[in-house]
Image (cartoon, helix red, strand yellow):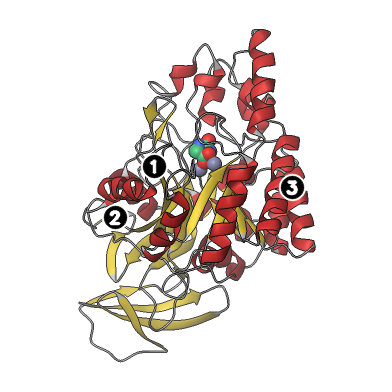
């Protein structure tokens, strides 16, 4: 099969030019002006941008959490991602205490294999270092799992102590792999939670009020210092606040290989979401929580200046009606996480390029290229070049949509609310090609379950 994408304005993290793109099977084989080639299919991208497919390096599909399971599985979640212009995700497999991480990998392969609309990889969450867990890290890396997530949050569940952290980091550094950190001081947060509950403070907003930015900043400071000692590169996931960013920048300034992503929700939503009537705030219960609005400007600045490298979603949706309500009488029982996988590209384009904060190249960098480089997929993914996978988004910069659970163009996630209900965006992905196959055509899904493949990622090589 061959495909010709004609007349588009091709934008990568480095380039901006008009040309045609010729694709054979799943690979870009020729780029040039007015290409005279025969193709099985032709797409006309005149007046549109052609971006590399979006890469979301932080999703939780079909993930057990707090006595329930995230509402999107690998079929529904990746289809929604495709609608939104994302053609690769990296999801998190979870090694549980006392069990092998190789067993966890098998479980996550079974969840995803044959179900996805787009390509996918896995990070491995490590919860203990018993048995041969450290040895398994190299086996996993050879299987394409070249990044490992650890938590200083959620004591008793996913939390690891500093000694464990150090040992896993040292091993990761030796193996040439990357550590991803959920950085919040879960031990102190648990004390704050106890104090709140003892005073009868059970509403959703107390989730945010017991997870202050200072406890995120403290954890960023600690984990970057431990990474420095262990000589391992570290990537802070879902960084949410100016306080935490300040600690990240301090580490970077003294030469620590410290990187970070923020998420769409921290750029657009804020603490006031928790002050809504009734139980509405539960829709935004996630960790870290949404912050005071002024933090948003600092996060945008972090992206502009390059201290934050990427925007992910931490997509971890739970239905409002029958999942978030598990915590109706106690905010600690509300499953943590929210939806957004489908909305990231259009939101970041709108807030970044549309509102004049950064260039088209920067948009591609933070939504695709940086993640490809950081997580061992570049230049196969994250750019448009001869030899790269033909993951392409034909994006209409003038198309306006109002994001809503009721808008058939903006909501395909398997969850009963939108975190961005009523947001008006200008600039929208219309047609999406994943490894050479058109899977979204004029906002309609035309792909098949199982189009996506597991991506065996390479070792960490920096940005
Ligand atoms: O609230 C969140 N972020 N849920 C997903 C799990 C995690 O910590 O990333
Ligand atoms: Zn996390
Ligand atoms: Zn997460």
In this figure, which residue is indicated by the disc labeled 2? 117
- Give the number of the disc on residue 411: 1
The relative height of residue 75 versus residue 292 in the rendered view (above or below) is below
Taking the view exactly as shown, the residue that stands out farthest to the bottom is 36
Spatial CA distance of label 2 from label 3 is 38 Å
Q: From the viewer's perspective, tell me whether residue 108 is left or right of residue 293.
A: left
Give the residue at x 33% y 66%.
Answer: 433
Give the image quarter of residue 52.
bottom left
**Discs 2/3, front:** 3
Residue sitting nearer the eye, 177 or 302: 177
Q: Secondary structure at mark 1?
A: loop
**The N terminus, quarter of image:** bottom left
Viewer can see residue 349 = no
Q: Does the closest atom of ligand 1 sit within 8 Å of the Cβ of label 1?
A: no
- Give the number of the disc on residue 221: 3
Circle 3 residues within 10 Å: few <14, some 14–19, many ≥20: many
Give the residue at x 74% y 41%.
Answer: 218
Taking the view exactly as shown, the residue that stands out farthest to the front is 131
Circle 1 residues within 10 Å: few <14, some 14–19, many ≥20: many
Q: Are marks 2 and 3 in contact (CB under 8 Å)?
A: no
**The C terminus, quarter of image:** bottom right
Q: Earlier in the sequence, mark 2 or mark 3?
A: 2
Residue 406 x/y as whole percent:
39, 35
Residue 85 x/y as whole percent:
41, 58
The relative height of residue 298 versus residue 194 in the rendered view (above or below) is below
Viewer can see residue 271 = yes
Give the residue at x 55% y 33%.
Answer: 286
């Amino acid at each position: 099969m061959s495909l010709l994408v004609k007349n588009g304005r091709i934008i990568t993290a480095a380039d901006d030019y008009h040309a045609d793109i010729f694709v054979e099977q799943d690979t870009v084989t020729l780029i040039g002006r007015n290409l005279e080639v025969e193709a099985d299919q032709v797409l006309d991208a005149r007046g549109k941008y052609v971006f590399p497919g979006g890469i979301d390096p932080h999703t939780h599909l079909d993930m057990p959490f707090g006595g329930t399971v995230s509402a999107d599985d690998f079929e529904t979640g990746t289809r929604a991602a495709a609608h939104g212009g994302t053609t690769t995700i990296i999801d998190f497999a979870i090694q549980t205490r006392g069990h092998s991480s190789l067993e966890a990998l098998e479980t996550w392969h079974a969840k995803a294999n044959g179900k996805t609309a787009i390509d996918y990889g896995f990070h491995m969450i490590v919860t203990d270092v018993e048995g041969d867990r450290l040895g398994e890290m190299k086996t996993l890396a050879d299987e394409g799992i070249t990044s490992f997530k650890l938590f200083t949050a959620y004591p008793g569940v996913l939390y690891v102590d500093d000694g464990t952290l150090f040992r896993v980091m040292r091993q990761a550094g030796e193996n040439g792999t990357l550590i991803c950190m959920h950085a919040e001081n879960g031990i102190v947060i648990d004390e704050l939670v106890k104090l709140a509950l003892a005073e009868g403070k059970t509403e959703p907003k107390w989730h945010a009020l017991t997870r202050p930015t200072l406890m995120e900043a403290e954890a960023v400071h600690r984990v970057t210092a431990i990474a420095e000692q262990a000589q391992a590169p570290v990537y802070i996931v879902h960084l949410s606040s100016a306080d935490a960013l300040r600690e990240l920048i301090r580490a970077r300034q003294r030469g620590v290989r410290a990187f970070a992503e923020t998420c769409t929700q921290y750029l657009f939503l804020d603490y006031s979401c928790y002050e809504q009537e009734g139980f509405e705030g539960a829709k935004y219960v996630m960790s870290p929580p949404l912050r005071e609005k002024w933090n948003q400007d600092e996060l945008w600045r972090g992206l502009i200046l390059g201290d934050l490298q990427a925007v992910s979603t931490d997509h971890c949706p739970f239905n409002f009606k029958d999942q978030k309500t598990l915590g109706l009488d106690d905010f600690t029982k509300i499953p943590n996480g929210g939806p957004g996988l489908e909305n990231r590209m259009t939101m970041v384009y709108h807030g970044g390029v549309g509102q004049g904060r950064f260039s088209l190249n920067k948009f591609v960098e933070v939504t695709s290229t940086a993640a490809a480089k950081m997580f061992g997929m570049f230049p196969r993914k994250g750019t448009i070049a001869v030899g790269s996978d033909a993951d392409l988004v034909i994006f209409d910069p003038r198309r306006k949509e109002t994001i809503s659970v009721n808008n058939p163009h903006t909501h395909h996630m398997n969850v009963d609310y939108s975190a961005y209900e009523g947001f008006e965006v200008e600039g929208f992905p219309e047609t999406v090609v994943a490894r050479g196959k058109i899977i979204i055509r004029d906002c309609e899904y035309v792909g098949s379950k199982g189009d996506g493949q597991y991506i065996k990622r390479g070792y960490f090589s920096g940005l």
